[in-house]
Amino acid sequence: MKLFGPAELAALPADKFFTQLSASLSDGGRAAAYFASPADGGRRLCAALAHDRAGRLELLLSEPLSDGFPSLTPRFPQLHLFEREIFELSGLRPEGHPWLKPVRYPAGGPDPGTGDFFRVHGPEVHEVAVGPVHAGVIEPGHFRFQCHGENVFHLEIALGYQHRGVERALSAGPGARSMHYAETLAGDTTIGHAWAYCGALEALSGCAVPPRAQVLRGVLLELERLANHTGDLGALSGDVAYLPTASFCGRLRGEYLNMTALICGNRFGRNALRPGGVDFDLEPARAAELLRRLEDVFRDTEGAVSLLWDTASVTERFENTGPVSRADAAALGLVGPAARASGVDIDTRRDFPYGPYSRYDPPKPGRGDVYARAYMRWDEIIRSVRLIRGWLASLPAGPLTAPCGAPASDSAAVSLVESWRGQVCHAAFTGPGGGFLGYKVVDPSFHNWQGLALALRGGQISDFPLCNKSFNLSYCGHDL
Amino acid sequence: METLETATRFAAALLLAPLLPGIVNRVKALFAGRKGRPTLQLYYDLAKLARKVPVYSRTTTWVFKAGPAAGLAAAVCALGVLPFGGRPGPLAFEGDFLFIIGLLAFSRFMTVLAALDTGSAFEGMGASREAQFAVFSEPAFFLSLAALSRVTGEFSLAGMFLSLTPDSWRAAAPVLALVTAALFIVMLAENCRVPADDPDTHLELTMIHEVMALDHGGPELAYILYGASLKLWLFAALIAAAVLPRHSGSWLYDGAFFLAAMGGIAAAVGIAESAMARLRMLKVPYMLMGGLIFAALALLFQTGR
């Protein structure tokens, strides 16, 4: 959560902006967000760069641009989707972008699945189109495979079916509805996005969140991680037709969700957070109950998940499936467990500590295959349980909220939260009156979908569902 | 009297076949700690599907409609020559084990044609996988039956299984064990069971048999599901007859013993499905090659005996 006052928001001339952006990116910076925001006389580009090693957050602003700008995608593939999004939303054209097509497709425009697709030509090449309507109750998305028999040459993912205009709605805030918009950016990341929104607002208004509220937020965020990671491990197991873990984890995920409900009355943690603190306390009796349940459920989780690592047929199926190399993961700017599983050692909880996190020690990076992504989840489950145990053992006393006043005018705040899927980035800009000029949301899925496409390259088309599950990305978080 | 008994046995096989997938699912539910589907679920499904009106894609022709019917007809014919509890089926004749292999191949051919007829990428992929894996499973099946034929010196299934006795196990245990293993592997693959396939998956890209049934609906889907249960019955019956040869003289007793063995085999399939994950698609041929090698070794051992 970092506030940038008016003094730090000096706009750079276009050429200097791009020189500086390239320099930062080649210096190990990662684009947490890159977007266009309205400004006098056109649109200006903003880049929020995370220097993960140094724990430094950099915000670059350009002077207003009117038509095109040089595309940096050929040098920095991680900007690929960001530049496409800028073109789609602002009309500023990234000159030299290798694959300039819409990201979400505007309302009234063509259906996302009907646009141009990268094609491989040849008499034996065939194309497989999957979705947007899928078997099973999941979100819509279109996947286009270029195949040679069972081998995949290339996978292109077309999303946008879930576009609701929620980012635009947030930009009109802050208002009574903003918090609810933030909580529903991606339903399974309610706490993650709610915290990022609160963090941005608190940074803008200079509000210091009381320690008790910070710890309760931490408990909620880690419970969200536990529920989703456990559910994912069960789903991975189900995809390889390994029944025991699939069934047990399906139940255990519900138990973790119920623990969130024990705190705030909602299984996904809706209305648990508010700018300035939290809305629900955890009195000693319920804290003890939560801890008791956590220990019980964790023991069951341990039993169910260890079956995965002990069953040769499962590990054989996971290993060497859908590999993403460390270099590719870093170049694409992957985040979260998917990045860590590929050996990119980043975790917002350690690199940009916030709230109750201090000296968090992320698991050892993996080798980049489905096994690594699955095992990373298990490693994180263990750490989340440890964190919650520690916090519940010594809940700080004190108030639950601090007054969160009006946001500072002409300022910006960038808020980073490590949700279960990876880094959530919210960036807010305020105008002269303290209202939002622009509000940018980057869900971890936005970074990671490209990683899934790459995991399939050279792989087997029958491995797609397993790879997809190992990333388990959000469609609505991407489509906003 | 003899005719009536034969007809009763044939009818019993046709009626009881959908029970096998029910037993498999009960065992799986037990292992997964869930309540699971009712044992008779497939009967309910068949009754429901029979009342529905099928919907056809405009790209399909009569081939698409012929596939399920031909598949079911082939399975019913195959059951006709299959012995039940050590007694010959109504259509049994000399050399009928080749006939069964031919019927299964015909059924596969029609299913693949019907799948290709839809022009769907998924179905095409399923058809290609089905045809590829058949290259290994068909010879394995053929060699297993050939080995049994050598062991018993008979050329009809009824003859083979009638002359198989517990004593045959004493005399030719390695051969029979290899044949049983080969048949079990072929059964898992041919009936889209784990580890070759996953009958419960909803993921089209990973399917083999199931994906070829995606565009069928109503009574035709019922034909496919019922045909699949007959096929499972067929393989289970072959294994039951090979593993537990028993002829007491009382056909009621033999029949009950046979049915118990069938239930046991269904339970074994359920246990195998609960205990392991499915193989990756690239490894399925290796499993089938394993079955092929078992069958070939059985034949070799028997020839050299």
Image (cartoon, rainbow, N blue to C red):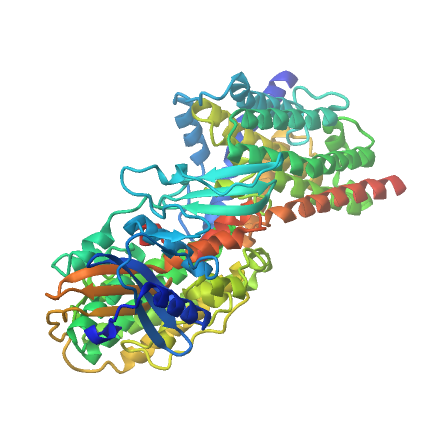
Where is residue A8 shown, x and y percent of the image? 25, 75
Left or right of A373 on screen, residue B111: right
Question: Closest to the observer: B165 or A233?
Answer: A233
Left or right, residue B148 beside residue B33: right
Toward the viewer: A349 or A146? A146
Residue at 30 percent of width and 46 percent of height:
A162
Q: List x then y, in percent, for residue A189.
A: 30, 60
Q: Is residue B141 above or below residue B63?
A: below
Q: Residue at x 34, y 61 (%)?
A: A34
- The answer to whether residue B8 of the structure is visible from this angle is no
Q: Visible in this render: residue B150?
A: yes
Residue A445 image offset from top left, x and y in percent: 38, 57
User: Residue A115 occupies which quadrant of the picture?
Assistant: top left
Relative side of A338 to B108, left or right: left
Q: Residue at x 66, y 40 (%)?
A: B186
| Above or below for A269 versus A392 | above
**Residue B216 or residue A165, whichever sits in front:** A165
- Quadrant position of residue A438: bottom left
On the rendered image, what quadrant is the N terminus of chain A found in?
A: bottom left
Residue B182 image position (x, y, % from top left): 71, 43
Which image quadrant for residue B166?
top right
